[in-house]
Structure formats: structure tokens, C-alpha cells
Image: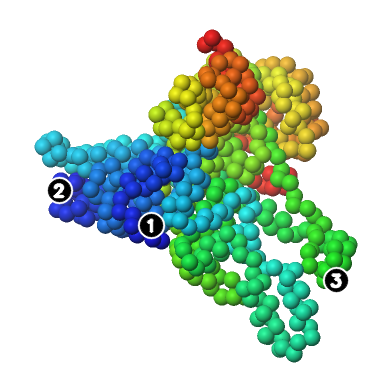
Amino acid sequence: MKQAVDLKHPSALVSFLSEHKYVADEDLATSLYLLLKLNKPLLLEGPPGVGKTEAALVLSQFLGTNLIRLQCYEGLDVNAAVYEWNYQKQLLGIRMQEGSDKSAAEKEKIIFSDDYLLKRPLLQAITQADKAPVLLIDELDRSDEEFEAFLLELLSAFQITIPELGTIKAVQKPYVILTSNRTRELSDALKRRCLYHWIDYPGLEKEMSIVRRRLPGVENNLLEQVVDYVQRFRSMKLAKTPGVSETIDWAESLMALGYREVNRQAMQQTAGSILKSAEDISLALAMVNEED
Amino acid sequence: MEKVQAFQTRSLSEGIVAFAQFARSHGMNIGVQETQDALMAADAGLLKERTFFRAALKSIFCHAPEEMLVFDRLFSLFWDTNPIDLNGRKGKSTIQGSFNKKSTASVVMLGVGQTGAQEEEAKNVSGANAAERLKKTDLSLLNTMEAAELDEIARKLFRQMVVRMRRRMKQDLKSGRINLRRTIRKSLSTGGEPVDLFYRMQTPRKQRLIVLLDVSGSMDKYSFFLLRFICTLKEHFRQLEAFVFSTSLKRITKALQLQHLDEVLKQVGTEADNWSSGTKIGECLQEFTEKYGKRMLNGSPLVLVLSDGLDTGDITLLGKSLQHIHRRAKRVIWLNPLKGMKDYQPLARGMQAALPSIDDFSSAHNLESLLELEKILMHAG
């Protein structure tokens, strides 16, 4: 919490983020700043591999708090996202109480107490006592509409109702970041509860500075070539467009193999770290061969 | 509403409220909540620099990447307008929103709009209200305006359909019976208490769907909606493979995400023009089985063919390849837009050859008939 109070201006965030190897523009920093100030969830959308998840990670570092992550998938339900009773332990509990002279109601109360509750990410996030955590709900577009509707309730009231225990209110409102790859449109109701920011593929300059931040040892010549190629790959019609994380991977593998420039041989050996399908790789190789 | 601009307001808060109204009047979806947030953002010290102020309002007002372009234009129009420039055209400042209008463009491009002579006929369909009428109108008889309108309706209805289909699948999951034997066997480790229940039916695999869409000249009036329909199906059938064909086959699975729809259409549109030399359904189906058959025709998928069956190629080949597909598929569904016509008989040579290998033969000439596919798909899945 403390840092958040001290924060006076988004530019402070920009510089903090860049110290922590995350290159953010003013737009993203402002969105994060608003997330902290207005305490509204932030929805980050963009193609895969542009640092949406990373943004949440760096934010948690900035706040000096922990990151609680919920990875969404199709079929994600309340049991996996919010809470579940520890049935095995409950059964053991019943056995152990068999000899005692407690009344049935008392026994039941013990069985349905905190000790027997398995907290899943969402419940963890709102019951954390000391410091408001950062809650990352990752790839929300993969979950079903039902789960999205459930989130609406959580995101507006920050409370969860468990029939056996009653309603649990957030001790500290967590800072929520949602990410989506836009494989499907999220509902308007959810969007309107969130701040919104679209992260796109970075331009040449920005991508170079990102890679340099991550791989300080990279030579300028190699870096320039790598990023230039990646930018061109993105403009081609590929089966899978490479993201920034792939650029970093690629530069790293080139360095590991001792290449100082991207030539035909280098491309052949390392294409797998930047392009992820056989068709794409053959397209890319054809492009390099043409240039030679 | 009287459109106020920045220079006409007296305080910053008033300016922000006026900007929210300004943006709303240009079609952005901004409510009281957003305005309030914007005021709070201003309060949080984001006013001193233009870039941050702009970024903050953007983050609050926009909900999709398409809106951002519009926002940028609105922002500079509202905050940078100099009263001197406005002389003579006061209050006439308009901006063309670019979102929600793309689809119209592609409709025009695909030739849906070029039906001047037939417009009358479409209008005379009797029905309760406009939306209902549109749903029943043959897709090839729409004019541009109606096509755009129907596109909106279609998007909504298709979405509802997908949600419904998913919900049904969920309910199915619960109906599995308990595998008593296994449950009891496993309960030994917990002293006879059946802690974990095992079900007889494992989580059913999601049905795979292969779609083959005819984009030849005779189909082009329908292709736009059919393609949109396929896009929506993709939300339910995650494992959906889609192909378009006329004289050759092209895989469009990758490009088939809603945001790329316009691109796909453009591509298909130009290629369809080049190919207008007829349809070779048989050869395309053969190409499909040869190139992709091994990979895709296993685990009995559903196969959906959208075509009018007007084949100019080798008919026996069509019959043979479809038979081949039929043997490996769970069900072959053929949607034919022509079937919507009165007294239609599947007399086209292509259709004749195909019929023996088709499980469901149904029409696809208007929105309603497309929505009926839901039933077929649910039964088949």
C-alpha cells in the first residue's frame, strides 16, 4: 500500500517499470496509475506475447506485494477459482470426533470451519490481510460466459458468499488485472467495470529497447537485425505472429550459439525459437535466401 | 443535443463532463460511471500534462481497440478546436466513427448490394416487424442497408445460439452415472468411505467440426453471412477447421477469428472474382481428403458443407470423395441456399451425386434457416 500512496504521477511508474526491465509507454503507465488510484480493475487486451502478464508481475513488485494468479481455461468453475471443501480432511475430522461428546451441530461447525476450506485464487485474493495483493486473471477470454458473469459480482462488490460460512468481504481490495487475447469478445457489462488498455506489438525502437533491457549483453548490430526481421515477420501472413517474448528468445539463442549477425545458417538453426510452424519457417527461409 | 466544445466550458470539470457527452453523441458507449471515473482521474493529479490526461481518458472511455482511433479524433476535435476556426460552421463538426461500419463495406464489396431490381420483392415479404421480416428474407435479396442491419441481428442471434449450445453441453456433463465398482474399490483407501466419486461417463470430448464453404460466383451473395456464421460456430467448436473452395481449396482456419473477418472476406472476394470460371466441388473435396484427410478425418468429426451443388467439374469424383468423407465422418450436413426456393428439387447434377452420402440436407437461404442448424448440430454432437 505504501508505495501507492507515495505515487504522485504516472511518470514515476514509467521509470520504476523500466528499472525492472519493463518498458512501458505513458499510456500503459497511466492506466496502471489509474488502477491504483481509482482502484478499478484493468483489462489488458492484445495479441499473445506482448507483455500483458508481465505487466501484472511488475506491478506487484512495484507495490511490494504478492501476485495471485488465476489462469482461466474452458470449463473453469467456482470450485477451481474460488473455494473447495477439503473432503478427505473433513471425513477424517468426522472420524476423529466420533468418540467426543459434542452435539451434532457443534461437530458440523467444526467440519465447516476455515481449517477445512481450500482457498483458491479468488478467495485468497480477498482474504489476504496484511497488504492488498495484485490479482491477475489471465486469459479471461478462454473461460466460459458463466464464469465471466460470476466475476462481475466479485469485481463490483469484492465479496464472496459461501453458503456454509456466510459472506466474506475483502479485507483489502486487491488490485485486479485481467488479460485477454481477444479470441472472443468479452461482455460489455464486464468491460464497463474495467479500465481498458490495448497493448499492441511495439514499434522498432521500442522493441529494441525492450530486448536490450532484457539482454544487456546483446550487440547492437545483432539486435538491430533481429528486431528488423521480427518486424518484417509480423507484416507477413504467418500462421503464428511472433510476440516480443519470442524476439527475446530468438536473440538469446543466437547469442548462445555465438552468432554476431543473422545469416542464412543462423536462421536455419534458430528459426524454431521465433517461428512456431513448419510453413512459417519455410516462408522465412525463403525470404532470407532471396535477400542473399 | 447542443454540442458544446472545450472552449465553451468554464471549468475543467465541466469540460470533462461536456467531453463525455460529446463522445457519447458520437456513438461511444459512455455512461455516468465513466464520467465519474474521469473526474476522479482528474482529481488524482493527471491534469498537468496533456499526454497523461489523454491516456487516462482513453483508458476510461474506450472498451475496444477500434474505439481508440475514434477516441483520438474526438479528443483532438473537442479539446483543440479553436473558436476562430469554427466561424461559419458552428456546431457542424462531425466525425465519422470507423467502428461498426466495417462490415457494411464488405457487404458492398461482396456484391450483396447490387440487387436493385430485386429489392422490391424483398420488401414485400409480409411479417410482424422489420427484424422478423429480415430474418426471413433470402440473403441474396437484401440491399445494402438491410444487409448491414441484418448483420447486426445475426451477430446477436449467433452469439445467443453459441451460449445456448455451451450451456447444454454443461448439463450433459452432469448426467454421467456413478461408476459404483470403481468408487467402492477406491474407497478402500479411505476406510470404506466413498470420498471420490467416479463417473461412468468421462468428460465427453468436444465434437470436432469441419466446414467447407463454397465461395464460387453463384454463392457470393450468401458467402458473407455464411462466413460470419462459421466464425461464430468457432466459439462453440474450438476444434473447428474451415475451408473455402470454388475451383481450388483454401484453408482459412487460422484467419478465422472475428477480428480478421474483413480480411478474410476481402481475400475471398478477390479470389472468387478470379475464379468465376465455375465450381469444381469434386476436385476440391478430393484435394481436401488427400491433403488434410489423414489429419482431420479421424475421431469421426462432423462435416458441414455449404454449397449450392452447381458443379461444373467431374460429377463422379464428387460422389466418390463425398462418400469417402462420409465413411470417416460422424455426420455429413449439407446446407444449400437454393433449397429455400419454392419447389426446389435437388436436380443439379452435383447435388444428385452427393445426396447418397448426406445425412442432413437443409436450406441456408435466410437467417432463420441458419439458426435451425443449431438443432442438427446438437443432435449430432
Q: Quadrant of residue A209?
A: top left
- Rendered position, B86 above or below A102: above
Residue B230 seen in render: yes
Residue at image coords 65%, 37%: B240
- Rendered position, B243 above or below A109: above
For label 3, the SS is loop
Estimate the x, y position of residue B223 in percent, counting from the top left: 55, 30
> Spatial distance from mark 2 to mark 3, Cα to Cα?
80 Å
- Rendered position, A292 above or below A14: above
Q: How many marks?
A: 3
Estimate the x, y position of residue B120 in percent, counting from the top left: 44, 33
Q: Which residue is mark 3?
A: B191
For label 2, the SS is helix
Residue at image coords 16%, 51%: B9
Estimate the x, y position of residue B306 in percent, counting from the top left: 64, 31
> Spatial distance from mark 2 to mark 1, Cα to Cα?
39 Å
- Looking at the image, residue B326 sits to the left or right of residue A79; the answer is right
Q: Are marks 3 and 1 in contact (CB under 8 Å)?
A: no
N-terminal-most mark, 2 or 3: 2
Q: Which residue is mark 2?
A: B8
Question: Label for residue A3?
Answer: 1
Q: At label 3, which amino acid type do we have? A: Gly
For label 1, the SS is helix
Q: Nearer the viewer, mark 3 or mark 1?
A: 1
> Spatial distance from mark 3 to mark 1, Cα to Cα?
53 Å
Of residues A194 and A138, the one nearer the viewer is A138
Q: Nearer the viewer, mark 2 or mark 3?
A: 3
* Tag 2 subunit: B
- Rendered position, A23 above or below A191: above
Residue at image coords 53%, 73%: A167
Same chain for labels 3 and 1? Say yes or no. Answer: no
